[in-house]
Amino acid sequence: MIANPYAAALGGREPISAMRDTVGRIAALLSNWTPAQYERRAAPGKWTVRQIVIHLAQSELAFGNRARMALATPSYTSQAFDQNVWMSKEETSGATGPDALAALVSMNAFNRGLFGALSAAERETPFTHPEYGPLTINWLIEQMAGHLSHHLVQLEGIAKQ
């Protein structure tokens, strides 16, 4: 199994608790931001805060769906997606920063509920990814938690600018 690309960001923390804590910190950080603040970037050419939060909500949607499909479909192979293409489709959706934040908070809670209810055996349910090869639900949970932590660092950096 391929190494989790966000293992360092997770830092050995229990992933479901880390997901809850990280999303709570993101929500607290951004809860009173103005539309102009949501359009700030870490650097020219980088995503805005709004886009980062949309990306996180999209990731909760996609990765949660992967887990559910793997749990319900024997020999499941997930479908890869291009995050930049997904983002380009959102640019005309009218999704605001607060809309994306609400979606992130809700979908994260929904996914954590499922993950917390899984047995150890269910968390070891295998599936295949076309780019990463064989994975498990547990690997996916850890990836999701680390991914959130990775982007929290970005958001905190932008907030300090």
Image (cartoon, rainbow, N blue to C red):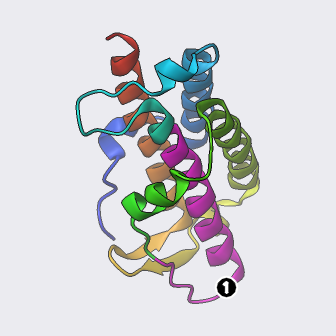
Q: Amino acid at mark 1?
A: Thr
Residue 144 visible in rendering? yes
* Picture coordinates of residue 65, whole percent (x, y): 64, 67
Residue at 44% over, 70% down? 81
Q: Residue furthest top?
A: 160
Q: Nearer the viewer, residue 8 or 55?
A: 55
Task: Name the quarter where the N terminus is drawn.
Answer: bottom left
Position in image of residue 101 (x %, y %): 63, 34
Left or right of residue 15: residue 147: left
Write down the quadrant of residue 69 in the picture. Answer: bottom right
Residue 151 drawn at (x, y percent): 40, 35
In the rendered view, tell whether residue 71 sits above or below residue 3.
below
Q: Is residue 37 above or below residue 21?
A: above
Circle 1 residue:
73
Taking the spot 69% from the left edge, 42% from the top edge, the residue there is 103
- In the image, is residue 88 part of the stretch drawn in magenta? no
Instruction: Report the side of 140 relative to 74 (left or right).
Output: left
Residue ID at (63%, 88%): 74
Q: Is residue 64 magenta?
A: yes
Give the residues in magenta.
Answer: 53-79
Q: Residue furthest left?
A: 44
User: Quadrant location of the C terminus?
Assistant: top left
Decide if residue 11 is in sight here: no
Predominant SS of the magenta segment: helix
Q: Nearer the viewer, residue 37 or 137?
A: 37
Disc 1 element: loop
User: Within 10 angstroms of label 1, few (less than 14), some, or many (20 or more) residues?
Assistant: few
Residue 132 in picture, x, y percent from top left: 33, 73
